[in-house]
Image (cartoon, grey):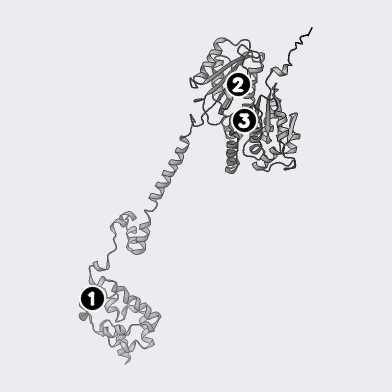
Amino acid sequence: MSELNLFLPESSLLKPRIIVFGVGGAGGNAVNNMITSNLDGIDFVVTNTDAQAIENSMAQNKIQLGPNITKGLGAGSSPEIGRGAAEEVSEEICAYLQECNMVFITAGMGGGTGTGAAPVIARLAREQGALTVAVVTKPFHFEGSHRMKIAELGLEELHKYVDTLIVIPNQNLFRIANEKTTFADAFRMADSVLHSGVRSITDLMLMPGLINLDFADVRAVMGEMGNAMMGTGEAEGENRAIKAAEAAISNPLLDNTSMQGARGVLINITGGGDMTLFEVDEAANRIRQEVDPEANIIFGSAFNEQLDGKIRVSVVATGIDTRVGQPGGLPLHKPSFAKVEHHQTHHQTQPQPAPEKSDQRIDPSVFNAEKAGFTPQKEQQSYIPPRPAEAAPPTATPQIRRPQTNVFNSAIKPEAVDHHETTETDQEDQEDQETPRGLSLFSRSPKHRPEDDKHGQRQLETVGAAPEERKIPDDVFDIPAFLRRNKN
């Protein structure tokens, strides 16, 4: 007679296997913080190209990436080296992924190891059939645009292989930090997003409660959903359910995402023995108001004796379109437009003083007008340089300036004097122009030369007269001729 062997499977076979992979320096720090918080039911694996960072990790499972490529010295901020280092130990990574139900990958985008190795680990996890969720960070603004570009390229590559992607910009830490927040405390705040997300899922599947969820429910919400957000809120006192729900759906650390348009929502409400049905209804309805009515909402509730007097609400919203409900999208560009308009106005008013300077160079009367109390703008409007053909007096033509130039040239260079012109005005001066004494005397007093009778400063006395009427006796005004006659 055959015997029936009845046995119960081991408890570990009844629970889903969840692994958290910490990739690179940022991922390793996140794993250390989760281990410190005593999160149960999770296996932790740390991977890095830096051998020293692996030795300092608190995780029991460690993988040295690229021992032959990097020699344990790191990836040097090169994603290509990080990718090759992960490919080198792909078999060792797959050994940890066997019979794994869910994989969380945490890394910092922008470096070499996290940016290059995280997509490789995600691809290997998907090939093993595991539900893959990545929780990664983006660099601070002060780290530069080059590092940010590397991070964006890494996110595009990682998005191809994960079921759900959650992005935490490090710059958002300034929303919750203050002047007394230390640098280490700020990163612990970012790691709390990963910690709360993992804990909310494990609590639903592992902890006892009135409404329990299994791993199939989690896969239905998070499988191949793309961008997602996680949030956890905890409150006590009056209206603690509403306060916890609002804190969960308004996580300031996440990227500019909104629950509007989410295709799947996972809600976990955990409390102590004093949690009432009315409070559970309040928290669930508050979250349901933020999502589409047609979204797949999976609700669960669990008990935790350590939460007496408190209520904890955890939300995982998946299938989010990042273009929907981004706060502050358009207003961020308004100040730049205002600056451009002010800049253009400045350039429109700047060229106005330019004509003033040009007029001052052309006509010296502008300087006299300014001394008289006229503004440059009025002077500019009233002054119009006359054309040579429109000069009112016949003697105000440019011919007045030409003999003056010849006078100064004759004082500097005697050989450049126009003898033909002087012969027509005064024939007696032709002989004395050849003598050095006459030239030196004229150079001292050029205003008394016979040439000046026609085009010099004596023009004021003979203006309007015909050329033949301007001849005046030499003994009246011609001092050089008078001196010459006395000499003879």
N-term-proximal mark, 2 vs 1: 2
> Image height check: is 89 above or below 301?
below
Which residue position is annotated with label 2?
A: 218
Query: Which sits earlier in the primary sequence, circle 3 or circle 2?
Result: 3
- What amino acid is found at the position of numbered circle 2 in the picture? Val
Q: Residue at x 71, y 25 (%)?
A: 43
Residue 51, numbered label:
none
Q: Are the residues tagged 3 and 2 within 8 Å (C-beta)?
A: no
Residue 21, horizontal then vertical, whole percent: 68, 30
Between disc 1 and disc 3, the foreground one is 3
Instruction: Tell me whether circle 1 and circle 3 mark residues in contact (CB < 8 Å).
Output: no
Circle 2 packing at 10 Å, graded few (<14), some (14-19), many (20+), is many
> Which of these two is toward me, 289 or 206?
206
Furthest toward the front, the residue is: 1
Is residue 41 depicted above or below 429 in this figure? Answer: above
Cα distance, mark 2 to mark 1?
A: 112 Å
**Whole-percent x, y for residue 172 in the image:** 57, 32
| Residue position for label 3 | 134
As helix, strand or loop, the secondary structure at mark 1 comes to helix
Q: Nearer the viewer, residue 46 or 156?
A: 156
Q: Mark 1 sits on what residue?
A: 462
Q: Is residue 440 visible?
A: no
Up-down relation of residue 54 to residue 422 (above or below): above
